[in-house]
Image: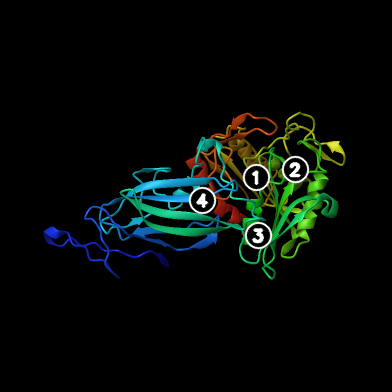
Amino acid sequence: MTLYGVGVRHWLVGLTAAVVVSGGAAACSARHSTHATIRVDAETALADQPVRVWVSGLLARETVTVASQAADAQGRHWRGEATFTANGDGAVDLDQSAPVSGSYGGADGMGLFWSMRPPTGDPDQAWFSPGSPEVAGAFEVRLTVTAAGREIAARTLTRQWTATGVTHRTLTLGADGAAGVLFLPPRGAVSRPGVLLLGGSEGGVGRKYDAALLASHGHPALALGYFGVPGLPETLREIPLEYFVTAARLLRAQPGADPGGVVVNGYSRGSEAALLLAESYPDLVRGAILYAPNDTVWPGFPNGGSAWTIGGAPVPRTAIPVTHVAGPVLAIGGGEDRVWRSTAQAQRIMQRLDDAQVTTAHQALIYPDAGHGVGSFPYLAAGTSQISPGTDVARTLGGTRDADAAARSDGWPKVLAFLAA
């Protein structure tokens, strides 16, 4: 347990309301504290790990505001805040205390982290990005306590994308046959399945945060670009499945990677590729994680045509078969998804696996109030709409910030357990 600040105990003595302060004298009114203590159980932790926060040294039943602040990659300062009433001992436990008001509601120890809002604009259309993990391996969150408009305690926490010893390397199409960023666990770590991470219709090399965190949990991880990258198709059209196979084999050959095969983790349109790979290359793909999944091959985006090819031929626009899937499948969907019906699609995938008598474990996690932003790692502020690729039009993803945050908080440990198993 670590401490910050000077602990203060207030005792009212007679009519003079004299104050006795442990460790030294300090002036204080009988109505408001002038000092407090912020305690945390981890001053430095991975960005996907919860941190417990307590505030002590307050007056009994005193009203205070606890706030969080962090800078994004553009230097904008995001902020979350919650107003609490201290208990009879003059303390606030953020895990147990529900705020009277603020940027989130209900008792939630990490509410100040995921509920941060940008300084301007609609928070539902904003996504907190503190910088690429291969450039900035960590970011800072400053916590403050304010009483009667006066700051009485402050503490800065470090949130890491990469654990000590994690390395990364940028892959290029010319040198490696694949474009992306590869994150590797510390040397000497126990061999675990590599995870191939595929984004959706946004293109480019996304999901770097996921890859950095998974490597920090011991899994070699590759955030792969498959269109919208120099040398690759400009749009999601006619993407060869063989390209993913090249990346998966490269990943499987890395130090610390289980040579038995990789897990493909696809989000949205990337879930189509992930499921197609599990079906078409069962000796290589030992499992699939599908966020906001699709069970059917859709057209290319945004201009139609074939999205995927295999052996140079278009993959038919039909329900994705699962009769050859050899590894476990985890599908995660939101009941309020407004991009497509990911809950029904996740359930159909499970039903087809049952009908095909696939014996490996498969499970659907359904979060009724979450939207298309149902995944993946928790505690980072995220909106519920985004600009459609190639346009200036915002599309609604469905759900709410708090429902999506709750889904990620619950789902991420289950993803880690799935990978560990």
Mark 4 and mark 2: span between their CA atoms?
A: 40 Å
Which residue in the structure is indicated by mark 2?
A: 276
Q: CA distance from mark 2 to mark 3?
A: 25 Å
**Residue 96 in sight in this render:** no
Q: Find numbered disc 1 in the image and state the secondary structure of the residue it sits on.
A: strand
For label 1, the residue is 290
285 or 112, which lies in front?
A: 112
Seen at 81% across and 47% down, the residue is 243
Looking at the image, is 258 positioned above or below residue 358? below
* Other residues around mark 1 within 10 Å, as few (<14) / some (14–19) / many (≥20): many
Q: Between disc 1 and disc 4, whose residue precedes?
A: 4
- Whether residues under marks 3 and 4 lie with C-beta atoms below 8 angstroms apart, the answer is no
Give the residue furthest to the right. Answer: 312
Ranked by sequence position, the earlier of labels 4 and 2 is 4
Where does label 3 land, which residue?
Answer: 215
Q: CA distance from mark 1 to mark 2?
A: 11 Å
Three-letter amino acid code of the residue under disc 2: Leu
Q: Earlier in the sequence, mark 2 or mark 3?
A: 3
- Mark 3, secondary structure of its residue: helix
Amino acid at pointer 1? Leu
Instruction: Specify the amino acid type for callout 4.
Output: Ala
Number of residues whose C-alpha sits closer than 10 Å to that of mark 3, classed few (under 14), some (14–19) or many (20 or more): many
- Image coordinates of residue 256 in percent, x first then y, are 71, 65
Label 1 vs label 3: CA separation?
19 Å
**Is residue 145 something one can see in this rendering?**
yes
Q: Which residue is mark 4?
A: 70
Residue 295 in which image quadrant:
top right
Horizontally, is 374 left or right of 235 in the view?
A: left
Q: Residue at x 17, y 59 (%)?
A: 17
Residue 212 position in % (x across, y down): 64, 56
